[in-house]
Image (cartoon, rainbow, N blue to C red):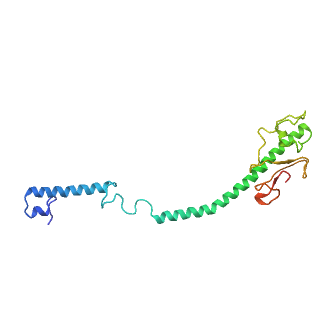
C-alpha cells in the first residue's frame, strides 16, 4: 500500500489534524536543513559537499611526489653546478682574448706592449707615451670571474706577454677548475 506524500504515522494513528500538520512541518524542516548541509560545505553535519576521495590528495600521494622531486634534484643539481664552473672558465678565456686584442692595438700604436709596471691600466689611461691613442678598452679593466685581477707580465715567459687568471683557488697551477686560465694556450 502506498502512503500519501505528507501523511505521517501519527496521522494514521488517529491524532487530531493540527498535530499531524505540526509533525509534517517538522519533518519538512528537517529535510530542508539536511539539504542545506549537503549543498553548503561550511555547515557541519553528516552530509558532505564532496564525496570521499574526490577532493584533494592523500598523504601518500604527496609523499611520493616529494620523493620523486628529491630524486630529480639530487640527479640534476650536480650537473648544473659543473656547468657553472665550466662557464666561468669560458668567461675567463673570453676576457683574456678581449684583453689580448686591446694589447695588440696598443702595440700597433705605441710599438711595444705595456711593461709589467705599466700593467693593463695602460689600456685605459696614457702611461706617458706620445703615440698612445687610447683608451683601448671601452670600460674599466674587468676582474676575472672569481673576482681577482688578471696577472700581466711583459716580457712574458711564454711569448711577448703573459696574461692569465689563477682560477678558482687563486694559486698558481692546479687541475680542473683550479687550473690557471692562460693566454698562451
Q: Image point 63% across, 63% down: which residue?
A: 75
User: Where does the C terminus fall, quadrant-wise?
Assistant: bottom right
Residue 40 placed where, x, y %?
32, 53
Q: Image point 19% across, 58% down: which residue?
A: 27
Question: Is 105 displayed left or right of 47 in the figure?
Answer: right
Residue 149 placed where, x, y %?
79, 47
Residue 170 placed where, x, y %?
78, 54
Residue 53 placed where, x, y %?
40, 63
Compared to residue 99, the image places residue 51 above or below, namely below
Quadrant housing residue 18: bottom left
Question: Is 34 displayed left or right of 106 in the figure?
Answer: left
3, 51: nearer the viewer: 51
Quadrant housing residue 23: bottom left
User: Where does the N terminus fall, quadrant-wise?
Assistant: bottom left
Figure disc tally: 0
57, 42: nearer the viewer: 42
Query: What residue occupies the far top of the structure in this picture?
Result: 130
Quadrant housing residue 111: top right
Q: Image point 30% across, 59% down: which residue?
A: 45
Amino acid at each position: 500500500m502506498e502512503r500519501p506524500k505528507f501523511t505521517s504515522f501519527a496521522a494514521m494513528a488517529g491524532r487530531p489534524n493540527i498535530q499531524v500538520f505540526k509533525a509534517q512541518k517538522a519533518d519538512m524542516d528537517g529535510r530542508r536543513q539536511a539539504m542545506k548541509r549537503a549543498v553548503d560545505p561550511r555547515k557541519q553535519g553528516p552530509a558532505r559537499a564532496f564525496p570521499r576521495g574526490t577532493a584533494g590528495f592523500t598523504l601518500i600521494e604527496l609523499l611520493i611526489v616529494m620523493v620523486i622531486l628529491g630524486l630529480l634534484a639530487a640527479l640534476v643539481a650536480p650537473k648544473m653546478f659543473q656547468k657553472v664552473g665550466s662557464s666561468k672558465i669560458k668567461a675567463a678565456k673570453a676576457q683574456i682574448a678581449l684583453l689580448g686584442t686591446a694589447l695588440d692595438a696598443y702595440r700597433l700604436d705605441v710599438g711595444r706592449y705595456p711593461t709589467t709596471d705599466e700593467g693593463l691600466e695602460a689600456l685605459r689611461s696614457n702611461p706617458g707615451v706620445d703615440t698612445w691613442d687610447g683608451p683601448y678598452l671601452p670600460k674599466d679593466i674587468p676582474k676575472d670571474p672569481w673576482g681577482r685581477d688578471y696577472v700581466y707580465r711583459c716580457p712574458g715567459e711564454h711569448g711577448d706577454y703573459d696574461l692569465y687568471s689563477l682560477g678558482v683557488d687563486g694559486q698558481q697551477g692546479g687541475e680542473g677548475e683550479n687550473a690557471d686560465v692562460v693566454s698562451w694556450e
